[in-house]
Amino acid sequence: MDSGFLFEAGALLPSIGVGLIFWFALRALLRADRSERRAEREAEREYRESHDGDEQNHVA
């Protein structure tokens, strides 16, 4: 009876391992995307602040 449980538990380990790898990969992708979007917003904000005075001087 004990050996049956070990075989059943052992059969689930590869699926659990692949699931964990998939979860870590998706987590890394989503965090990288979030960081990229944050950096993009920051760069755009800095660009707009630095060019805000230029637009006011070019108005006809």
Image (cartoon, helix red, strand yellow):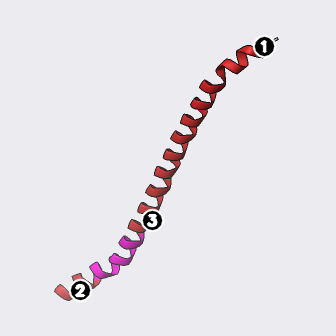
Indicate the quadrant containing the N terminus: top left, top right, bottom left or bottom right.
bottom left
**Dot in front, 2 or 3:** 3
Please give the name of the residue rendered at 54% of the width and 46% of the height, measured from the top-left corner. 36
The x and y percentages for residue 30 are: 48, 51
- Foreground mark, 2 or 1, reads 1
- Please say if 36 is above or below 56: below
- Secondary structure category for the residue under label 3: helix
Residue 2 numbered mark, or none: none
Res. 4 mark: 2
The reply to whether residue 50 is visible in this rendering is: yes
In the image, what residue occupies the spot 60% across and 24% down?
A: 49
**Tags 2 and 1 in contact by the CB under 8 Å rule?**
no
The three-letter amino acid code for the residue at tag 1 is Val
Q: Kindly identify which residue carries mark 3.
A: 22
Residue 5 at what x, y percent from top left? 22, 81
**Which residue, given by chain and number where applicable, does mark 1 sit on?**
59
Q: Quadrant of residue 37?
A: top right
Question: Which quarter of the picture shows residue 41?
Answer: top right
Looking at the rendered image, the disc whose residue lies closer to the viewer, 3 or 1, is 1
Residues 39 and 32: in front is 39
Can you give x and y, in whole percent of width and height, for residue 38 in the image? 51, 40
In the rendered structure, which amino acid carries the disc numbered 3?
Answer: Phe
| Residue 14 versus residue 39 in the image, above or below | below
Q: CA distance from mark 3 to mark 1?
A: 53 Å
Magenta residues span 8-18
